[in-house]
Amino acid sequence: MYKFFLYCMLVILYLGLAKTLSPSELGVHYLQNEKGFAKLSDKENSSFILIDTHVTGFLIKTYYQKYRVISDYENIEDLIVRTSKEFARRNMENIGLSLFRRADGREEFNPLPPGSLYIGDLEYGYWKKNRDGKMEWRFNKSFKNLPNYLGWGEFRPDEEFYKEMKLRTNAGQPYYGPNNEFGTKGKVTRAAFPHFFREDRMKKVELKTLLIEYLKENF
């Protein structure tokens, strides 16, 4: 009887601890899969860039993603959504990529490097020959801050990048750059969003340790 009672208490404590460590879901939208992006923003020229993903809870896990939403030129906001386990896990390798884009009534869902919506659009920029003789994309002065928001760093796409990106777009395939610069394993992404790759985020804490700390603080 005592063991059964202790087991029940542990279950209750686990659930309480899971809730304590979970952020409030008040006002947080739910994104089951990529089809739900359209409901999160009705603005044209919109791009959703995945910049973080997180899971909370022990017995009951809740999955969250954080997006940088760029729309209507330089309207920038960071948006946190609750998402399905399947969708969160499917995109674990897609940190730093644009998972949804809308322009001219068209919607795209294949993962592409951030800024793919604007490359080649003369409303945003132009092609200029670089020191290596390659045509390189540059943003107009009115959009000079976009590379910072996109997480490009020193990276600038050239025409070969653009052509391959368009081929992947038409085929509905993901694209991580000619040398896999983007995505969770990409060096450009890792430099742009270092908070996601901090060592302390990757450490696993034993449930026993968390439970002991919880008991000390609350009993």
Image: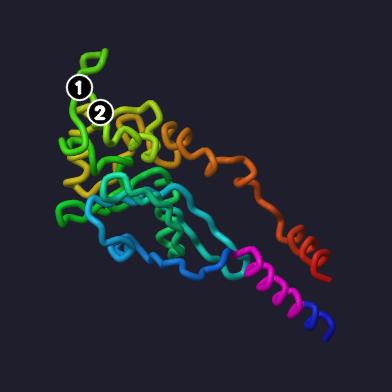
Name the side, left or right, on which 176 lies relative to 165: right
Quadrant for the N terminus in the image: bottom right
Instruction: Give the x, y percent position of residue 66.
Output: 45, 54
Residue at 49%, 53% (x, y): give it.
53
Instruction: Give the x, y percent position of residue 4.
Output: 78, 82
Instruction: Give the x, y percent position of residue 213.
Output: 79, 61
Residue picked out by circle 1: 128
Residue picked out by circle 2: 138
Q: Is residue 47 magenta?
A: no
Query: In this picture, which residue range is highlighted in magenta?
Result: 7-22
| Relative vertical location of residue 18 with respect to residue 78 in this rendering, above or below | below
| Relative vertical location of residue 59 with respect to residue 202 in this rendering, above or below | below
Quarter of the view holding residue 153: top left
How far apart are the alpha carbons under marks 2 and 1? 7 Å
Q: Nearer the viewer, residue 200 or 104?
A: 104
Disc 2 crowd, CA 10 A, few/some/many (<14, 14-19, 20+) = many
Name the side, left or right, on which 95 lies relative to 108: right
Quarter of the view holding residue 89: bottom left
| Relative vertical location of residue 137 with respect to residue 39 in this rendering, above or below | above
Q: Residue furthest bottom?
A: 1
Instruction: Give the x, y percent position of residue 62.
Output: 53, 65
Name the side, left or right, on which 144 lies relative to 125: right
Residue at 25%, 47% (x, y): give it.
173
Quadrant for the C terminus in the image: bottom right
Identify the amino acid type marked 1.
Lys
Identify the amino acid type marked 2.
Arg
Q: Nearer the viewer, residue 100 or 27?
A: 27
Residue at 30%, 30% (x, y): give it.
178
User: Label 2's element?
Assistant: strand
Disc 1 crowd, CA 10 A, few/some/many (<14, 14-19, 20+) = few
